Image (tube, coloured by chain):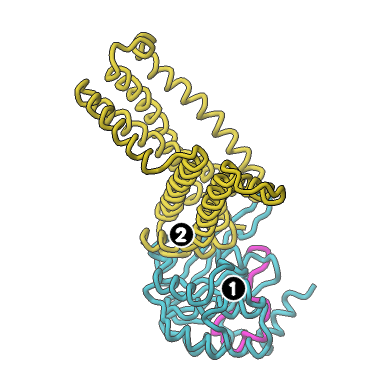
């Protein structure tokens, strides 16, 4: 049933996210064209130059808006689809609460990832155009640089350290995003157990969870980081050692995120199972 | 085994007691009217049967099970409010019901939609209040469920549609299934009811067949209800 829920969730969110990301890509192309036009001085007409500037400005707004829309969709899908009137349908489908929460979480993560990739690509595109770099030259330069870096990595035996570092970074980022989503979910699920002031209470729970977790993670991270000496980090004897140290720090962060995610997930499921209180 | 059974069921919202020590047993194959004035606890009881609320004490069982994933497979529930996503059109909703409920009978739904002139392409947000209620009821009644829990199914529709809806309930009714209709429009539903449950201030104080009420009181259920609940 999780597959069917994911299908519904993608259908519900895709109708907003796809046009938003599509519009961002179109804006990026327009901004690239107008940006290169401005730099190359293709026109002296003030109105045209103003319009070109406006497109650049709109692109900036578009990038921020795409990020904001992704966050708003993540929150509103949980709120509207589970805790408002639509919850009457969702909670009477023959699915478990776990499946409901996972479907929301997985789809939110996918959209965060897709939005992140699109923003990275469009910013890169604009950066290339504005720096007047020829893409072919850049690729050739990058290719020769990469060969040099790669041979250095292999000769110094850095490959394993790099792999560890990037794996730790990816897992840490993914779990961080999971924690952000579950933080909102848990706060809303808790706030909606009450009969009145549900939104206000959700905000209160959000703040309380933030405080509790910042205290918890601070002590957990201190315990973890205390094992890493300053010398190890600041005066690492080699790149390999430095990256190993950074990886260890990231794994400690990941561990604290894992604990947070587990607590928030259990709290969300428990509130929805035992305290569901649809208006 | 009873299809719906409450035993000493109590639900409170803060200081308000919505259901107070309710015990009730509904057997398969009956159409039951859950009748009572506004705020008497009808909706709360149906929500509890669907697991949308958790009781403070007592228990409610569907075919011997507490409300859970298994009971949702056999219960078809119509809430008292618009509960379908307003961006969806009828076809998407048919797909959704077909996806999740193995007992959903799509040809039956299409037949009813055609009869009530509701297009498959129509979005929920484009529908009038009455059409929306009709679409919801069609989806719910197109399942071959064992228990139908209908909360105010005819409240927002015109009298002609009311007749069609009640006729639909009777026509699609599987003799082994039970239907619980919560309403205060008693005169309209009376002809289709086998039993009635009177509920007031969260307490069930009468559970009889409609024939028993008519024989004992010499009145219709509607007249009897008006007498009992006179302000």
- Left or right of B204, for residue A178: left
Q: Is residue A23 visible?
A: yes
Q: Which residue is mark 2?
A: A9
Q: Is residue B66 magenta?
A: no
* Residue B113 drawn at (x, y percent): 53, 85
Queried whether the magenta region covers residue B186, the answer comes back as yes
Rendered image: mark on residue A232: none
* In this view, A204 is above or below B46: above
Find the magenta span and give its range: B183-202
Q: Colour of chain A?
A: yellow
Distance (Cα) linking label 1 and label 2: 18 Å
Rate crowding at label 1 as few (under 14), some (14 to 19) or many (20 or more) other CA atoms within 10 Å.
many
Q: Secondary structure at mark 2?
A: helix
Q: Residue at x 60, y 34 (%)?
A: A207
Residue B200 position, x and y percent, is 67, 67
Judging from the image, what secondary structure is the residue with disc 1 in? helix
Indicate the chain on which mark 1 is placed.
Answer: B
Label 2: chain letter: A
- The chain assigned the colour cyan in the figure is B
The image quadrant of residue A228 is: top left
Q: Are marks 1 and 2 in contact (CB under 8 Å)?
A: no
């Amino acid at each position: 049933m999780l597959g069917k829920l994911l299908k519904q969730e993608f259908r519900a969110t895709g109708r907003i996210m796809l046009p938003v990301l599509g519009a961002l890509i179109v804006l990026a192309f327009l901004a690239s064209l107008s940006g290169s036009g401005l730099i190359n001085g293709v026109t002296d007409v003030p109105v045209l130059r103003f319009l070109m500037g406006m497109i650049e400005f709109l692109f900036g707004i578009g990038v921020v808006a795409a990020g904001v829309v992704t966050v708003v969709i993540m929150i509103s899908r949980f709120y509207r689809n589970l805790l408002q009137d639509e919850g009457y349908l969702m909670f009477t489908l023959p699915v478990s609460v776990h499946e409901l929460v996972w479907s929301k979480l997985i789809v939110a993560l996918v959209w965060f990832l897709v939005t992140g990739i699109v923003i990275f690509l469009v910013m890169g595109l604009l950066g290339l155009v504005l720096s007047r770099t020829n893409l072919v030259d850049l690729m050739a330069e990058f290719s020769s640089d990469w060969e040099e870096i790669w041979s250095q990595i292999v000769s110094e035996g850095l490959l394993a350290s790099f792999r560890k570092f990037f794996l730790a970074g990816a897992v840490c980022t993914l779990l961080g995003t999971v924690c952000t989503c579950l933080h909102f979910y848990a706060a809303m699920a808790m706030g909606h157990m009450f009969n009145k002031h549900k939104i206000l209470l959700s905000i209160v729970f959000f703040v309380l969870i933030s405080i509790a977790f910042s205290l918890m993670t601070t002590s957990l991270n201190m315990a973890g980081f205390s094992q890493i000496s300053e010398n190890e980090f600041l005066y690492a004897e080699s790149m390999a050692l430095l990256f190993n140290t950074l990886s260890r720090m990231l794994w400690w962060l990941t561990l604290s995120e894992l604990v947070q995610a587990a607590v928030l997930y259990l709290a969300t499921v428990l509130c929805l199972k035992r305290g569901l209180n649809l208006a | 085994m009873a299809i719906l059974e409450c035993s000493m069921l109590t639900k409170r919202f803060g200081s308000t007691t919505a259901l107070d020590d309710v015990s009730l047993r509904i057997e398969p194959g009956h159409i039951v009217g859950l009748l009572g004035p506004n705020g008497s606890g009808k909706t709360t009881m149906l929500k509890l049967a669907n697991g949308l609320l958790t009781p403070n004490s007592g228990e409610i069982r569907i075919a011997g099970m507490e409300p859970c994933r298994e009971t949702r497979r056999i219960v078809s529930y119509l809430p008292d409010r618009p509960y379908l996503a307003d961006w969806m059109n009828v076809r998407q909703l048919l797909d959704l019901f077909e996806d999740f409920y193995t007992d959903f009978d799509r040809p039956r739904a299409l037949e009813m939609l055609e009869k009530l002139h509701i297009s498959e392409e129509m979005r929920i947000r484009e529908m009038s209040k009455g059409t929306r209620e009709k679409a919801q009821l069609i989806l719910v009644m197109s399942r071959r469920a064992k228990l139908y829990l209908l909360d105010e199914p005819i409240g927002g529709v015109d009298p002609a549609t009311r007749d069609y809806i009640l006729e639909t309930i009777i026509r699609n009714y599987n003799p082994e299934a039970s239907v619980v209709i919560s309403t205060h429009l008693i005169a309209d539903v009376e002809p289709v009811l086998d039993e009635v449950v009177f509920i007031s201030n969260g307490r069930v104080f009468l559970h009889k067949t409609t024939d028993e009420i008519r024989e004992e009181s010499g009145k219709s259920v509607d007249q009897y209800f008006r007498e009992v609940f006179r302000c």
